[in-house]
Amino acid sequence: MKLHALFLNCTLKSSSEVSNTQALIDKVAALLAELDVESETIRVTDHKVAFGVSSDEGEGDEWPTILERVNACDILVIAMPIWFGVRSSVAQLVMERLDGTYAEGDEVTGQYPLYGKVGGVIVTGNEDGAHDCCATTLFNLTHLGCMVPPNVDCYWVGDAGPGPSYIEAGGDKHLYTNRTARYMANNLVWGAMALRANPIGTNLKVLDAEARAVSR
């Protein structure tokens, strides 16, 4: 069965507008296709996602539909623009909503739903902040259960101050970004195949019980 990658585009723009983040997603998705991986992208702003830290915030919340796709994927990539030096508010919202999966562990092992998946991150923007966006997001993904192989971040940043971003500045010809896109695609696939062949066997429920026993 083919591996399946899901990109969550956390741009502030709707699908009616051009997204520089989407352009870099498309590059990585094309590289994954060469490795026989199917990809899909969800632009989060096209959905009514409520604020909150549960998996379902009630009437009108469309996050549960997105979460179904998250739970079905092998590779999860959070893609975002930089705003004020940090990840976009939409990316922050997504990570807060994924917090709800902590309460949905496997009945036997307690493993969270993102166990068995590999995570990656894509960032575009001007000035600085890419390293912070990558570091924070990848750390969040590991806590949620994802495995993070080496070199699974890909970013492009422009000059300081307002100016052209990835598309307008010809970022598709940028050596470093093209290199890391390839590192990312190949290592995500390696990680997903490794997990498929060797599922994580850790029983969190047993370890929780052990921790409680020595914490009284």
Image (cartoon, grey):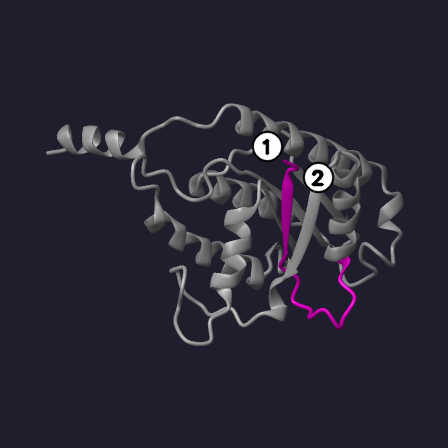
Q: Is residue 186 above or below residue 121?
A: above
Disc sitting over residue 29 in the figure: none
Q: Give the residue type that dot 2 points to.
A: Val
Mark 1, secondary structure of its residue: helix
Which residue shows up at 76% across the image and 70% down it?
Answer: 17
**Dividing the image into 4 quarters, which one contains the C terminus?**
top left
Q: For the residue carrying disc 1, how many other residues have a C-alpha within 10 Å: few (<14), some (14-19), or many (20+)?
A: many
Q: Are marks 2 and 1 in contact (CB under 8 Å)?
A: yes
Whichever of callouts 2 and 1 sits on the residue coming sooner in the sequence is 2
Q: Is residue 137 above or below residue 53?
A: above
Q: Real-space Cα distance between discs 2 and 1?
A: 10 Å
Please give the range of residues in magenta: 1-20
- Viewed as shown, does residue 157 lie left or right of 100? right
Q: Is residue 89 above or below residue 58?
A: above
Which residue is denoted by mark 1 in the rendering?
A: 192
Disc sitting over residue 37 in the figure: 2
Q: x and y percent of residue 202 in the render?
A: 36, 27
**Dividing the image into 4 quarters, which one contains the N terminus?**
top right
